[in-house]
Image (cartoon, rainbow, N blue to C red):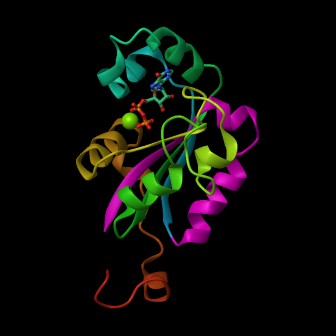
């Protein structure tokens, strides 16, 4: 079963969307395996957004991501990386499809409410970046038979 990292960004925290975002993932049938609030600093953001450090908007992205604490979540499920990316929507909230988190709540390419890992490999790297092993919990195996057929797990 895959694990993926979601960050509720300062734009989602300030606009009081955390409860709704967590509910969406839970109602979908995804499992919250880890959850915490944390203040990000420049060093972790330079690592997390290494693919963007040379872009002109990077200083603005840094400032945006440090404005408030974020909520970090490790989300678990079959194909969880793609399912969560689909629920997240396109990077720019103005282009994201209605029904997605960004499509429903964002008008911006930067202030786009959540981060979600973009591949299985990056999911594992990003969970290690934000969580200690003991902060990830395995507590809901007995619910899987209500979420999946036996051959899907
Ligand atoms: P993603 O979050 O959809 O995976 P990435 O390209 O990995 O998109 O970019 C990471 C984050 O950087 C975005 O979620 C957004 O907050 C910010 N970002 C990306 N492109 C732009 C841009 O053109 N202007 C401003 N911010 C951007
Ligand atoms: Mg990305």
At 41% from the left edge and 67% from the top edge, which residue is drawn? 138
The quarter of the image holding the N terminus is bottom left
Q: Identify the residue at the far left of this view.
A: 121
Answer left or right for 122 relative to 127: left
Q: Above or below — where is 117 with respect to 13?
A: below
Q: Is residue 25 magenta?
A: yes
Displayed-image quarter of ligand 1:
top left
Q: Residue at x 62, y 56 (%)?
A: 22
Question: Which of the 4 quarters of the picture holds residue 130?
Answer: top left
In front here: 52 or 67? 52
Number of numbered labels in the structure image: 0
Residue 101 position, x and y percent, is: 60, 50
- How far across and how far down the image is residue 135, in percent? 44, 50
Is 76 rendered above or below residue 128? below
Residue at coordinates 45% horizontally, 14% vertically from top-left? 42
Q: Is residue 140 left or right of residue 151?
A: right
- Magenta range is 1-29
Residue 149, compared with residue 137, is above or below; it is: below
x then y, percent, for residue 127: 36, 45
Q: Is residue 15 above or below residue 81?
A: above
The residue nearer to you, when weighing 93 against 129, is 93
Q: Pick whichever, 28 or 94, lies toward us.
A: 94
Q: Is residue 87 magenta?
A: no
Q: Residue at x 51, y 48 (%)?
A: 89
* Residue 114 % position (x, y): 55, 40
């Amino acid at each position: 079963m895959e694990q993926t990292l979601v960050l509720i960004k300062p734009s989602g925290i300030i606009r009081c969307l955390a409860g709704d975002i967590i509910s969406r993932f839970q109602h979908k049938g995804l499992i919250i395996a880890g959850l915490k609030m944390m203040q990000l600093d420049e060093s972790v953001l330079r690592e997390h957004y290494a693919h963007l450090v040379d872009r002109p908007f990077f200083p603005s992205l840094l400032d945006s991501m440090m404005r408030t604490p974020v909520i970090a979540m490790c989300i678990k499920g079959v194909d969880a990386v793609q399912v969560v990316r689909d629920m997240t929507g396109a990077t720019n909230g103005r282009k994201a499809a209605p029904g997605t988190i960004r499509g429903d709540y964002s008008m911006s390419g930067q202030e786009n409410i959540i981060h979600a890992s973009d591949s299985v490999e990056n999911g594992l790297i990003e969970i290690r970046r934000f969580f200690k092993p003991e902060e990830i919990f395995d507590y809901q195996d007995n619910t899987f038979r209500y979420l999946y057929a036996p051959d899907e797990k």
